[in-house]
Amino acid sequence: MCSIMFDADLSGLVRDREVTLWYLQNDVFTGVIVTGTGTGCHVLGVNLKEGETEADFTDERCVELVRLATGRPDLDVRVLDRPVFSISHVLADTYRVGRVFFAGDAAHTMPPTGGQGGSTALEDGCDLAWRLWLVLTGQAGPDFLDTYDAERRPIGELMADAQLANLGVRMPPEARVGYPEPLKDPVGVLLGRRYHSTAIIDEPGDDGSLLEDPRVPTGRPGSRAPHVVLDWAGQRISTIDLFGSGFVLLAAKPGGQAWMDAGRLVKERLGIRLTRLLVGDELIDVEGRFTERYGVTESGAVLVRPDGYVAWRSPEAGPDPMGTLERVLRRILSR
Ligand SMILES: Cc1cc2nc3c(=O)[nH]c(=O)nc-3n(C[C@H](O)[C@H](O)[C@H](O)COP(=O)(O)OP(=O)(O)OC[C@H]3O[C@@H](n4cnc5c(N)ncnc54)[C@H](O)[C@@H]3O)c2cc1C
């Protein structure tokens, strides 16, 4: 594909409409035009035909293509750049080789259709960062870094396949061969992902799914910790605001105090950053939904990782909260 970046006045290109992304097919080319408003930089993406190379995209031809795409034969066009790139769908076999970790396009090159390549790259970076932090500060064992590949590679594959499917539906029908089916729930792909690795303690009977419907969160280990409205010292916050710095142990009053006490002891014994929060104490469950959303009773507990994913939960009180919590954390942290 050639991205022709150009400067031209496209005011009034389509009356009464605010559209920025157009897929075009006509006798001359198949491509996409991304328009800014009025003057400024716009992009025309043109699919290369068999045998065409970068050299075929001279200034004159680029101007001609822009005029054809916009339907303005006399348009004053200034070509700014015309990089040629291949649309790819390539996945690394592993995200880790010894001390080397793969992230972003090096791990998963995907078609741009859907705009998730950069987002997935940023997620990889954040994900690797908190795992490295745990290992470098001695909170987790070195094997913990293998969980990066175990958790992120299936997501990279999922996103790359989803974008490939999006490309397929935008292809002319005769070229739409061998593409995966588009995902039914694009929101689920972004907010309903699940992880499975030794850093998650799956519950018996877990279906191992990579996706769930984020509109009906389950609080299952491996899922994003659900949103619940809380009142904290007169301020409205979300449970999501509690995560991001170390582990968080959540339990409800009155039965959760035993888990809080266990958390204090285990935190000291293992030397980990763990925040213990009792819902119903300094945090008020405004809508009374915490236990239902997190799938625990008022004597259970939930352990949330620094990335906001549920690592483990105990729906009920247990006979030995401290022993249980220590075993859980040792297993999760590869200690
Ligand atoms: C047309 C198009 C539209 C897109 N739209 C979106 C979008 O809307 N949303 C989105 O999230 N993503 C989008 N993407 C994808 C996104 O641009 C990429 O997924 C993202 O840039 C990948 O980031 P990265 O850091 O992994 O790799 P890159 O951005 O490729 O960065 C790698 C860097 O390494 C440098 N480098 C390479 N080799 C060496 C070397 N040997 N030594 C030193 N440096 C080196 C390169 O020069 C480059 O700067 C789009 C991509 C395209 C092509």
Image (cartoon, grey):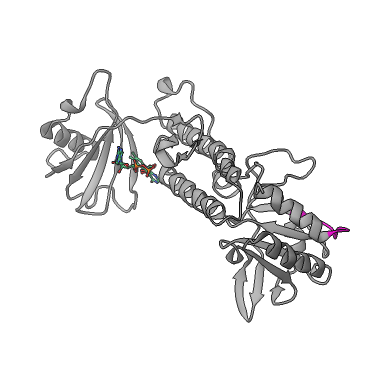
Query: Viewer-proximal residue, 67 or 163?
Result: 163
Left or right of residue 5, residue 219 in this image: right
Magenta residues, start to end: 313-320
Q: Residue at x 64, y 81 (%)?
A: 233
Left or right of residue 96, residue 4 in this image: left
Estimate the x, y position of residue 176 in percent, counting from the top left.
Answer: 44, 23
- The answer to whether 27 is drawn above or below residue 273 in the figure is above
Query: Viewer-proximal residue, 138 or 295?
Result: 138
Query: Viewer-proximal residue, 257 or 237?
Result: 257
Left or right of residue 9, residue 87 in this image: right
- The answer to whether 72 is drawn above or below residue 49 in the figure is below
Q: Residue at x 80, y 42 (%)?
A: 204
Magenta: predominant secondary structure element? Answer: loop
Estimate the x, y position of residue 22 in percent, counting from the top left.
Answer: 34, 41
- Quarter, ligand 1: top left
Was residue 217 drawn as part of the magenta stretch in this picture? no
Estimate the x, y position of residue 332 in percent, counting from the top left.
Answer: 67, 49
